[in-house]
Image (cartoon, rainbow, N blue to C red):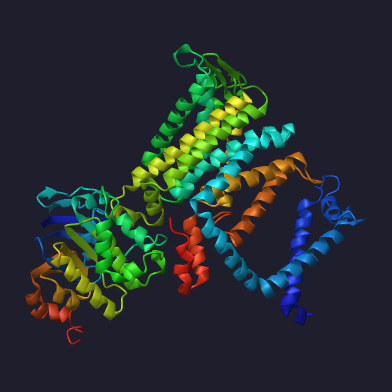
């Protein structure tokens, strides 16, 4: 579904991605793991058009999207849940969800209902302004907003960031449900144990390179991964 | 003595007296080179009437006001919270009522009738002229700038450029410039309207497309430069614009449709009606725009540009659109001013002018159509009043002291403006009501 070939991203003199290649197949959850500064977020920014790669290629459903602009990605079928959630703080929950359907023509009330079924808390809060929601609720809203654009591929940037463990649990359960309903998911996560339990496959990034990729179950038992990323969380 | 300074009541009293002493200096007579201290001593010592009761000196009057201020201040601290809760409760009822369609239509209709009858109620020629030149035109300008600043959140300090383009286009189209009119025909001013709007919009797009990628301060600087460039062009392109002399031969609006013939002349009232018609058209247009898809895209961009991109909004497209719409409104206002006064001078298109319009928008409430209309009316009426019946010692440039003080006070007590936009109002309302009552506050407020 999504293929990245030798993508290089530089910020001025600093190279953030040294030619990474990976792929995401239809219907799976792929986790991108790595420490701070490994290049995970840059990868997602590149995939959502916020940074064009200096060289390399991004292919989505057979179409070259390397130089596509950020605002064109939703209409292609790629939804992006940005790092730090970035909901519209002064709009109500309802309006935030409506904004998610901005690029669509026609009625979207069915999808609104579906979102309220997936996230019952948002229905309760639908007249509240986004800025007043808790972190977890905002994350759900951000995911809901991205889903309103009917993406076939959903990019999630650090969905667990700054959230309580119990809420992270809920969010990951919902990500699983999203995959089950037919949307492919690429998730960037620091919480490696949590992400690998959910994902089908994973890639491990280090200093702007993908060091290895494997099925999630293999990664969970891999000695290198356990040592570096699961050192503390493996026991929990 | 130290004990007194620690006393909050004493501090409050001294602050009141100090504030009044400054106000006394501000409103007092100006000094002169011969007697440098005259301004100072005169401000406090000049004879004055104690509210028409008996004759005394200025300092007595101001001391009295300072005591009143101290009293109000103290009682506000004591009972203010209760008053606030009570007014919030009282205000919440009419607010929810006012969103019912018939009531809103009723209020609109009453305002419309008042606007139409106004020239018959106010017959003073000064005020009739001011209503057109200084109020109606400024309402238009404020409405236009509100689209740029309020809706799209872009700081435009060169708004005057588009106003100048509108005015000069009128002069060009009607054949009042040294340059030949288009096709050698001296058109009627009505034809100047679409041409001026088109040219101003074009200028907005040409300026906006490359520069709107910039954010915040950078955009402000670029627009500031553009405003200056247009003024300098007007001043120096002698053969095209008439240079610093401008032009004095722009004709009035006239109408020749079959048997109907009408010439707008020197009397302001016909111009008032002409302008009011366009103000109403722009009001309706902007109101629709605010609640359209475009309006929502502007809100999204203003709140979070990255998030807006992630839901598929092209920020550049919508910013340029806002810029062009604002510009065309200013261009239209330029047509009205040029036709009504028959004259244009480059010296009237200054940075000061752009800032004045920005003050109207900020004072009224950025993003709130009702707010900016009210803001423009209040400030312009106020400054015209000061010009018409100046208080003792008032000089025209003193206006900016008052405007500055007004803005400072506004920023402290009503930072979102006179009539904040609903989104901002809702936010403030929520914060004051506290978490438990959010839903109640909102139920009357959903569109």
Task: Tell me: residue B250, above or below residue B434.
Answer: above
> Depth check: B185 or B129 in front?
B129
Q: Is residue B362 left or right of residue A65?
A: right
Residue A113 screen position, x and y as percent: 27, 62
Residue B130 screen position, x and y as percent: 67, 35
Residue B429 screen position, x and y as percent: 51, 65
Residue B37 screen position, x and y as percent: 84, 52
Task: Tell me: residue B209, above or below residue A44.
Answer: above
Residue B347 visible? The answer is no
What's the residue at 59%, 19% (across, down)? B262
What's the residue at 82%, 60% (across, down)? B62
Q: Quadrant of residue B3?
A: bottom right
Query: Which quadrant of the rendered structure holds the N terminus of chain A?
Result: bottom left
Residue occupying the far top of the picture: B184
Q: Is residue B300 left or right of residue B52?
A: left
> Depth check: A48 or B432 in front?
B432
Q: Is residue B215 left or right of residue B342?
A: left
Q: Is residue B341 left or right of residue B441?
A: right
What's the residue at 54%, 59% (across, down)? B95
Query: Which quadrant of the rendered structure holds the C terminus of chain A?
Result: bottom left
Task: Tell me: residue A3, above or below residue A207.
Answer: above
């Amino acid at each position: 579904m999504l293929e990245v070939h030798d993508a290089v991203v530089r910020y001025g003199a600093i190279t953030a991605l040294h030619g990474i290649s990976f792929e995401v197949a239809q219907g799976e959850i792929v986790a991108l793991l790595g420490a701070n500064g490994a290049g995970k977020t840059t990868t997602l920014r590149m995939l959502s058009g916020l940074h064009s790669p200096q060289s390399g290629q991004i292919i989505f459903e057979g179409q070259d999207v390397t130089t596509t602009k950020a605002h064109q990605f939703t209409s292609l079928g790629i939804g992006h849940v940005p790092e730090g959630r970035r909901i519209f703080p002064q709009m109500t929950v309802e309006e935030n969800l409506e904004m998610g359907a901005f690029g669509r023509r026609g009625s979207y009330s069915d999808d609104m209902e579906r979102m309220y079924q997936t996230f019952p808390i948002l229905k309760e809060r639908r007249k509240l302004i986004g800025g007043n929601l808790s972190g977890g609720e905002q994350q759900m809203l951000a995911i809901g907003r991205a889903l309103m654009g009917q993406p076939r591929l959903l990019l999630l940037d650090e969905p667990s960031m700054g959230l309580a463990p119990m809420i992270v649990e809920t969010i990951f359960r919902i990500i699983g449900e999203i995959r089950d309903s037919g949307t492919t998911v690429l998730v960037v996560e620091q919480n490696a144990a949590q992400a690998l339990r959910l994902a089908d496959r994973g890639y491990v990034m280090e200093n702007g390179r993908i060091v290895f990729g494997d099925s999630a179950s293999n990664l969970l038992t891999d000695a290198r991964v356990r040592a570096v990323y699961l050192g503390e969380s493996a026991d929990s | 003595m130290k004990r007194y300074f620690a006393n909050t009541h004493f501090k409050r009293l001294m602050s009141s007296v100090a504030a009044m002493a400054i106000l006394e200096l501000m409103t007092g007579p100006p000094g002169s080179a011969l007697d440098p201290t005259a301004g100072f001593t005169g401000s406090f010592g000049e004879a004055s009437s104690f509210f028409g009761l008996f004759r005394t000196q200025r300092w007595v009057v101001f001391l009295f006001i300072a005591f009143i201020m101290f009293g109000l201040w103290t009682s506000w601290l004591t009972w203010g919270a209760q008053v606030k809760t009570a007014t919030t409760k009282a205000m919440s009822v009419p607010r929810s009522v006012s969103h019912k369609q018939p009531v809103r239509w009723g209020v609109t209709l009453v305002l419309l009738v008042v606007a139409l009858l106004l020239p018959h109620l106010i017959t003073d020629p000064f005020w009739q002229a001011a209503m057109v030149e200084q109020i109606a035109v400024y309402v238009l300008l404020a409405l236009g700038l509100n689209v740029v600043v309020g809706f799209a959140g872009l700081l435009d300090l060169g708004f005057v450029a588009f106003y100048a383009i509108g005015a000069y286009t009128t002069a060009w189209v009607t054949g009042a410039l040294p340059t030949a009119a288009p096709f050698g025909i001296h058109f009627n001013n009505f034809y100047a309207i679409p041409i001026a709007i088109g040219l101003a919009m074009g200028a907005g797009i040409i300026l906006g497309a490359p520069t709107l990628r910039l954010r915040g301060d950078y955009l402000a600087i670029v627009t500031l430069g553009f405003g200056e460039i247009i003024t300098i062009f007007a001043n120096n392109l002698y053969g095209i614009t008439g240079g610093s002399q401008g032009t004095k031969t722009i004709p009035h609006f006239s109408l020749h449709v079959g048997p109907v013939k009408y010439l707008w002349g020197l009397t302001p009232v016909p111009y008032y009606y002409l302008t009011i018609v366009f103000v109403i058209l722009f009001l309706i247009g902007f109101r629709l725009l605010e609640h359209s898809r475009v309006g929502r895209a502007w809100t999204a961009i203003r709140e979070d540009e990255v998030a807006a991109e992630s839901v598929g909004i092209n920020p550049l497209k919508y910013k340029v659109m806002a810029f062009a719409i604002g510009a065309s409104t200013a261009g239209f206002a330029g047509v009205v001013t040029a036709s009504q006064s028959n004259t244009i001078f480059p010296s009237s298109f200054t940075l000061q002018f752009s800032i004045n319009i920005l003050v109207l928008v900020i004072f009224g409430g950025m993003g709130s159509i009702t707010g900016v209309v009210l803001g423009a009316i209040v400030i312009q009426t106020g400054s015209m009043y000061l010009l018409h019946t100046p208080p003792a010692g008032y000089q025209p440039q003193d206006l900016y002291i008052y405007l500055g003080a007004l803005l400072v006070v506004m920023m402290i007590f009503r930072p979102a403006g006179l009539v904040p936009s609903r989104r901002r109002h809702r936010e403030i309302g929520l914060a004051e009501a506290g978490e438990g009552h959010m839903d109640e506050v909102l139920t009357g407020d959903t569109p």
